[in-house]
Image (tube, rainbow, N blue to C red):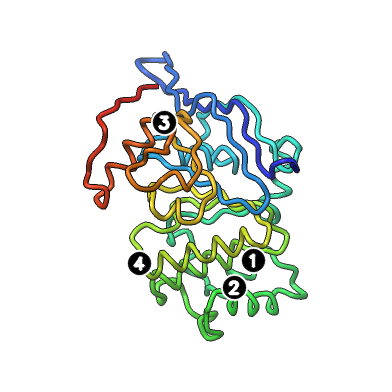
Amino acid sequence: MSEPVLAVSGLDVSFVQYAKGLRTRTVPGISGLDLDVAEGEILAVLGASGSGKTLLAQAILGILPHNARTGGEILFRGSRLTPARRGRVLGREISYIPQLVTSLDPLMPVGAQVRIGLDPAIAERERRRLFARYDLQHHVARHYPHQLSGGMLRRVLFATSVRDTVRLIIADEPTPGLHTEAVEEVLRHLRELAASGVAVLLITHDIRSAVSVARRVAVMNQGRLVTLETADAFTGDGADLRHPFARDLWRALPQNQFSPGGTEWHS
C-alpha cells in the first residue's frame, strides 16, 4: 500500500494555565492519538463536544492557542509537518473547510474571496470553473456573504477551499444546522473530492452522515481515540462494532430507539 497522505502518531495536546499567583497547571486535551488518512479516503472523526476533534484539526493546521503544548508526530505525504513546511502547504496542498460560514470576510464579495491564493493570470477563469462546479451563478460573485443563503455560503466555502493542488481537506463540522437537502449536497461534494484522489478528514458529531460517506470511523472520547471502526459496521443494532462505546453511540440515536447498552468508558 502507498504511504498515507496524513499520518498522526502519538499526538499529545495540553494547555498550560495559571492557577493561583504564578503557579501553573497543565490541562490535557489529546493523549496519544494515532490515525492516518489515505489518498482518496474519507476518514470520519466522531465524538461529542469536548472530545478533542477540533483540537486535532487545530494541531494539524498549526492554529492551536499560544498556551498549547504538543508532542508526537504529524506526517504529511511522508514528511514531518514542521511549522516551516506547514507555511508552504497550507492553502495549496492542505485545505480547511471551517464549521462556521462567518469565516468568510463580510466586507469582501464572495467572488473575490474565491480568487484569493490563485495565480492572478488564471484567477478569474478558475473562479468561474469553481462556481460552475458548486452550482453558483456568475452574478453571485458580486454578492457579499450576508446576501446569500446558508446553503450558498457552504458552497462558497467549498469553492474557497478547493484547489487542483490540494491533497488533504480537513472539514470541521460542515453540516450543522443544514436541512436534509443541503446536508446531502455537502456530502456529495466530499465524495467527489475523495473520488478525485483527495484525502478527506471529516470531523463531525453527525454519525449517520459520517458513515454514509466514510470508509473508516475514528471515535474519540475525552481526548483519546477510543476505537477505529469500519463505516459499514454502523448498521442494525451495531453488533458488528468492536468497541462498546461505539455501539452505545450508535444505539443512542433517535432512530435506534435511544437504547444505549449502558457501557461506560473512561480515559
On screen, residue 20 versus residue 161, left or right, reads: left
Q: Nearer the viewer, residue 212 or 56?
A: 212
Q: What is the three-letter code of the residue carrying label 2?
A: Ala
Q: Which residue is mark 1?
A: 116
Point out the tag, 2 or 4, that comes first from the N-terminus. 2
Rendering quarter of residue 132: bottom right
Q: Which residue is mark 4?
A: 180
Determine the residue positioned at 52% across, 29% down. Answer: 68
Q: What is the three-letter code of the residue carrying label 4?
A: Thr
On screen, residue 24 versus residue 35, left or right, reads: left
Give the quadrant of the N terminus: top right
Q: Secondary structure at mark 1?
A: loop
User: Whole-Å distance between the Cαs marked 3 and 1?
Assistant: 44 Å
User: Whole-Å distance between the Cαs marked 3 and 2?
Assistant: 47 Å
Q: Which residue is mark 3?
A: 243
User: Whole-Å distance between the Cαs marked 2 and 1?
Assistant: 7 Å
User: Whole-Å distance between the Cαs marked 3 and 4?
Assistant: 29 Å
Q: Which residue is mark 2?
A: 112
Determine the residue positioned at 65% across, 29% down. Answer: 73
Residue contact between numbered discs 2 and 1, judged by CB atoms under 8 Å = yes
On screen, residue 211 versus residue 40, left or right, reads: left
Point out the tag, 3 or 2, that comes first from the N-terminus. 2
Determine the residue positioned at 69% across, 38% down. Answer: 83
Residue 34 location in percent, x, y?
Answer: 58, 30
Q: Nearer the viewer, residue 64 or 43?
A: 43
Rendering quarter of residue 138: bottom right
Q: Secondary structure at mark 2?
A: helix
Residue contact between numbered discs 3 and 2, judged by CB atoms under 8 Å = no
